[in-house]
Image: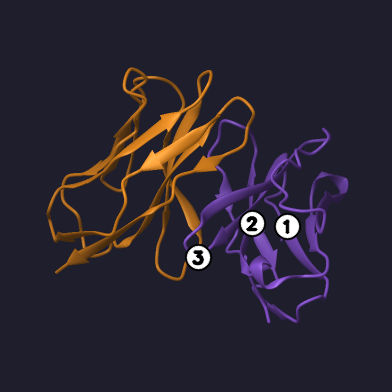
Chain colours: A purple, B orange
Amino acid sequence: GAGVSQSPSNKVTEKGKDVELRCDPISGHTALYWYRQSLGQGLEFLIYFQGNSAPDKSGLPSDRFSAERTGGSVSTLTIQRTQQEDSAVYLCASSPHVDYGYTFGSGTRLTVV
Amino acid sequence: GNSVTQMEGPVTLSEEAFLTINCTYTATGYPSLFWYVQYPGEGLQLLLKATKADDKGSNKGFEATYRKETTSFHLEKGSVQVSDPAVYFCALLPNDYKLSFGAGTTVTVRA
């Protein structure tokens, strides 16, 4: 596609359930980020993938969060045993090169009730 | 560590007024600097960027100059328009490639 695609666009889940968020980056983009945007908290780095290198997971807030990127393309962010504080907009971004600006998807708005 | 500080909003201006949003950064090495914009109900969009000292990024009438001596990347627009209300984010891409964002500045425009 022409841009970064994220699905679902909205997700409401019950506390304690697991959720999977998907990101389809722009074809050929080797760098992929996940960020979280919470109300009043700004943009928080979660994880970074670059090509076939080991991902930088230093931003994941707890071991309930994990992410993978299959075949250097699609990425899935998984949150296990969701908590109310996980409610936020989860943004994915990709880039063809680390010095380029990153193209962001429209995000997945996660609400944990 | 690496960080970005930008002026708090909201900033409210009259149409055609001069807009400045201050951004300063702390980083090791030679980071790239960006301004992103988030229009109401939309996702983040890259507005402009600068990859080395003294570079000037520009787009849609907005400009920002990478000032290494003052570690700043202030965003300016000479004549703000009614299409410009949004949240503006200054961002830093340091050597470790973790894109760090400022807290965002909300801009509103009075017609």
Q: Is residue A92 above or below residue A48?
A: below
Mark 3 and mark 2 in contact? Answer it, CB < 8 Å.
no
Q: CA distance from mark 3 to mark 1?
A: 25 Å
For the residue marked with disc 3, what is the amino acid?
Leu
Residue hosting label 3? A39
Disc with the residue nearer the chain's start (2 vs 1) = 2
Residue at coordinates 76% horizontally, 81% vertically from top-left? A14
Disc with the residue nearer the chain's start (3 vs 2) = 2
Q: Observer-nearest residue: A6 or B93?
A: B93
Q: CA distance from mark 2 to mark 1?
A: 6 Å
Q: Which mark is residue A4?
A: 2
Q: Is residue A101 left or right of residue B66?
A: right
- Number of marks drawn: 3
Q: Is residue B78 above or below residue A6?
A: above
Mark 2 and mark 1 in contact? Answer it, CB < 8 Å.
yes
Q: Observer-nearest residue: A99 or A21?
A: A21
Inspect this view and state whether residue B100 appears: yes
For the residue marked with disc 2, what is the amino acid?
Val
Foreground mark, 3 or 1?
3
On what subunit does the disc labeled 2 rest? A
Secondary structure at numbered mark 3: loop
In which image quadrant can residue B56 be found? Answer: top left
On what subunit does the disc labeled 1 rest? A
Q: Which mark is residue A24?
A: 1
Residue at coordinates 68% horizontally, 82% vertically from top-left? A113
